[in-house]
Amino acid sequence: MKSAQHWLDSIRALPLASRVRIMNVCGGHERSISMAGLRSALPRNVELIPGPGCPVCVCPEEDVHFAMQLALHAGVILAAFGDMLRVPVNVPKMEPRSLEQAKAKGADIRPISSPQEALKIARENPVRQVVFFVAGFETTTAPVAAMLMEGVPDNLLLLLSCRLTWPAVAMLLDSEAPGFDALIAPGHVATVMGPGEWGFVVERHGMPAAVAGFSPASLLAAIYSVLRQMQEGKYFLDNCYPEVVRNGGNALAQTHLKNALHVVDANWRGIGIIPASGFELAERFAKYDARKVFAEYETQGRKRSGEMPPGCDCARVVLGKIYPDECRLFNTACTPRHPIGPCMVSDEGACRIWRTG
Amino acid sequence: MCLGIPMRIVSIEGYNARCEARGVMREVSLFMLQDEAITTGDYVMVHVGYALQQMTEQEARSSWELLDELLAHDPDVQTG
């Protein structure tokens, strides 16, 4: 594998006439870019834009609120990935405004890092109902589907807020001003789903694209690839992460997804409904669907339900319309210690990465 | 959460494997790789406790270097 320096030199040797905006759609990519200082190492007219790459950031506020109601009032054990716990919701003063605060009020909420831990909690507590609240992209959704196909105990229910990554990019590209000229496609999503699902970027929109891994060398190889494609006027979907990204991806993982879940229209926080971009449990798993089992806990008419906190520009950050430091709350009212918007909460949120990276 | 960790398989029992990375042992599900020929000593890319794909030792090592840097930078980062 060629070094990061090799790719950087190759990029610098390209005669770049105009500004090129390259979007990434993966919090892991953004973290590597920030940490390695790639922005300052690249020629000034190459812009790297963090796009929709954070599942926690786009998880509907209503879903977080629903998870809190289950934990506070339905007597369940609520298991969720750690960075969901601090996402604030819109509630009247004095009420707990995050899962973390609900936990402090006595709700049984357990931060986990794997679907297997949710399984373990359910098995160890056979007389309790356990709800696994899961926000994630394909890399997380496929393991959840695999867990279902392998078999789960009857007391483990799922509250799914999983999303597909490519439909958000398709929505941006179909809009009047996508705001970018080339795409770096997410490496581990492509590991599961195959690189081919990003072909539409090239074929339908005439835009260069490359799948990248998470090392500076792989990211720079992908950046070089899309710049070179633009230079030559020959666009194709490049694979700069062949270590784990194979044509067709992981076919078995995709079969699990198809058998356990259905693709449905889904709401993205602050963005709205994106067609065929989310998942629900297949009919055969309906009894594990926390939305159905606990339907009476859905609250209606809550003030500012689904809205972003006042002044928070997370939605435009997620869509790559502005950089994190262009939000007026960034690093003033909104910090990793006291986050206001979800992009400052999650490890994959652009604001948190910009602050810590 | 899309940050995967390359791990070496230490032992396999059914669809589950004991895997090791940098001295840390974890239970990893091989359920999404059950059609592959995988044995002890092989390397896999692990995400949220599930092996997503096989990889070579050399590829695993270069990913670890990246991961070490990431963790040194922000110890709070969730590695799934």
Image: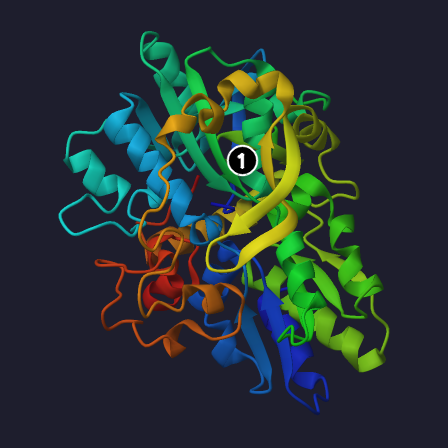
Identify which residue is drawn at 31% across, 13% down: A128
Taking depth in this image into account, of A343 and A249 the one nearest to the observer is: A343
* Left or right of residue B68, residue B54 in this image: right
Identify which residue is drawn at 66% across, 32% down: A262
Where residue A139 appears, as percent x and y from the top left, is 57, 40
Q: Looking at the picture, does residue B7 appear above or below residue B16?
A: below
Taking depth in this image into account, of A82 and B11 the one nearest to the observer is: A82
Q: Looking at the picture, does residue B8 appear above or below residue A155?
A: below
Q: Which residue is labeled 1 in the image?
A: B46
Where residue A23 appears, as percent x and y from the top left, is 60, 68
* Left or right of residue B62, residue A183 in this image: right
Crowd rating for badge 1 (residues with CA inside 10 Å; few <14, some 14–19, many 20+): many
Mark 1 belongs to which amino acid? Val
* Residue A185 image-quadrant placement: bottom right
Where residue A17 appears, as percent x and y from the top left, is 71, 92
* Left or right of residue A320, residue A195 in this image: right
